[in-house]
Image: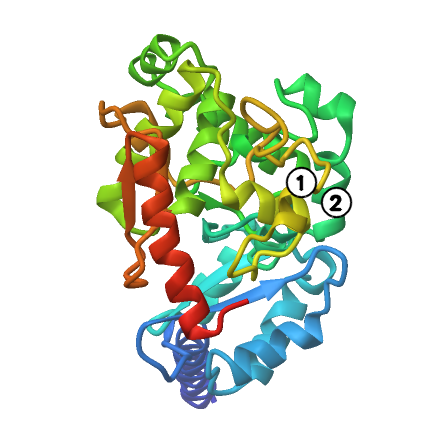
């Protein structure tokens, strides 16, 4: 009898051990085996305004190739994750397992976005470009960019605030709110304007904002990199002599039509502070967000005696530069003749 009882206990113990081992193996498999079938990195997004657990599961399955998303659903509910979802942009690596995935999501360990912006003229374009890469709404940015008191609190006004945005690549979290993004851009602006750059601006008797305004005109005038410092030198010569800049890109900006291929007399008469044919000096704000290259071209402008420029008649994108008005008029006549020949009105 005792021997039979011992045999039963021994069998039960072995059975329990086997069951525990199998359960442990299954648990390890569920928690630690890779669950994605792709190479590289994928991203899933959790919107702060719509924390939708079902949508996250769909993204894991459809975008990241989760092999059996029901396992994730069960584990997530066991750990009460659906009630504690944190918004963000999360990187999913091919070798990731359920434990690593859930720990990352529960802790809100986001992967930053590489935020970029360039070739922007208008404030609404800027807001849309930034919002298109982040969770925030463009209207949230436009409210701040259009608030005179707020802009003054960070050292700008609603006309000059575009100068605060230095085109580059910045790592920010997808969930960054509008006010924090503005603070980050102000910090980057201050870092960009080093003592060296500020010293060069002071030598020109221009503020950093005025340098950006001039750089925006220079950048609109030419897409040829080696011409940037030459064009900058030409406009600096005009500023020193208190001559109107007479920059065609400012007329396009005043007209609100960047597709103009030919500036006519009716355009030159547009009454706008941005029309540098009518108003002396720099316009009140940048006509685009200038690149770092254009800003540095102004700060390191080419010293010469040019006062006039006209697009070359070969339409190469380059310009003929002139010291005298008579020389400029000859250059302009050749260009007008070619415009007429090509039927450009």
**Viewer-proximal residue, 53 or 224?**
224
How packed mark 1 is, by other alpha carbons closer than 10 Å (few <14, some 14-19, many 20 or more), is many
x and y, in percent, of residue 133 in the image: 55, 57
x and y, in percent, of residue 82 in the image: 70, 64
Q: Residue under circle 1? A: 178
Secondary structure of the residue carrying numbered label 2 = helix
Secondary structure of the residue carrying numbered label 1 = helix
Residue 49, picture quadrant: bottom right
* Count of numbered circles on the image: 2
Residue 140 is tagged as: 2
Residues tagged 1 and 2 counted as in contact (Cβ below 8 A): yes
x and y, in percent, of residue 207 in the image: 48, 15
Residue shown at 53% from the left, 31% from the top? 163
Report whether residue 293 is seen. Answer: no
Report whether residue 18 is seen. Answer: yes
Left or right side of 73 for 52: right
- Compared with residue 8, is residue 175 higher up or lower down, i.e. above or below? above
Residue 176, picture quadrant: top right
x and y, in percent, of residue 199 in the image: 33, 10
């Amino acid at each position: 009898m005792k021997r039979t009882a011992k045999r039963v206990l021994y069998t039960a113990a072995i059975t329990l051990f086997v069951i525990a081992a199998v359960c442990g193996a299954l648990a390890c498999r569920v928690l630690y085996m890779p669950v994605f079938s792709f190479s590289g990195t994928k991203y899933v997004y959790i919107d702060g305004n719509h924390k939708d657990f079902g949508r996250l599961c769909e993204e894991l399955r459809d975008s990241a190739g989760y092999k059996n998303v029901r396992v994730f659903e069960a584990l997530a509910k066991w750990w009460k994750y659906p009630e504690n979802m944190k918004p963000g942009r999360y990187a999913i690596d091919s070798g990731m397992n359920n434990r690593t995935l859930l720990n990352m999501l529960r802790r809100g360990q986001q992967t930053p976005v590489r935020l970029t912006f360039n070739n922007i003229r208008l404030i609404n374009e800027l807001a849309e470009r930034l919002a298109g890469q982040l969770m925030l709404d463009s209207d949230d940015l436009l409210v701040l960019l259009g608030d005179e008191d707020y802009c003054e609190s960070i050292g700008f006004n609603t006309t000059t605030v575009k100068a605060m945005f230095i085109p580059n690549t910045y790592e920010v979290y997808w969930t960054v709110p509008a006010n924090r993004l503005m603070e980050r851009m102000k910090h980057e602006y201050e870092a960009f304007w080093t003592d060296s750059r500020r010293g060069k601006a002071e030598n020109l008797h221009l503020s950093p904002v005025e340098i950006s305004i001039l750089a925006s005109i220079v950048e609109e005038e030419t897409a040829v990199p080696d011409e940037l410092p030459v064009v900058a030198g030409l406009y600096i010569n005009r500023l020193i002599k208190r001559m109107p800049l007479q920059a065609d890109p400012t007329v396009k900006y005043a007209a609100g039509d960047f597709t103009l291929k030919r500036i006519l007399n009716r355009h030159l008469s547009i009454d706008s502070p941005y029309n540098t044919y009518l108003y002396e000096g720099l316009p009140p704000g940048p006509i685009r967000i200038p690149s770092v290259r254009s800003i540095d071209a102004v700060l390191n402008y080419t010293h010469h005696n040019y006062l006039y420029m006209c697009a070359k008649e070969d339409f190469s994108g380059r310009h003929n530069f002139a010291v005298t008005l008579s020389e400029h008029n000859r250059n302009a006549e050749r260009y007008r003749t070619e415009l007429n020949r090509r039927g450009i009105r």
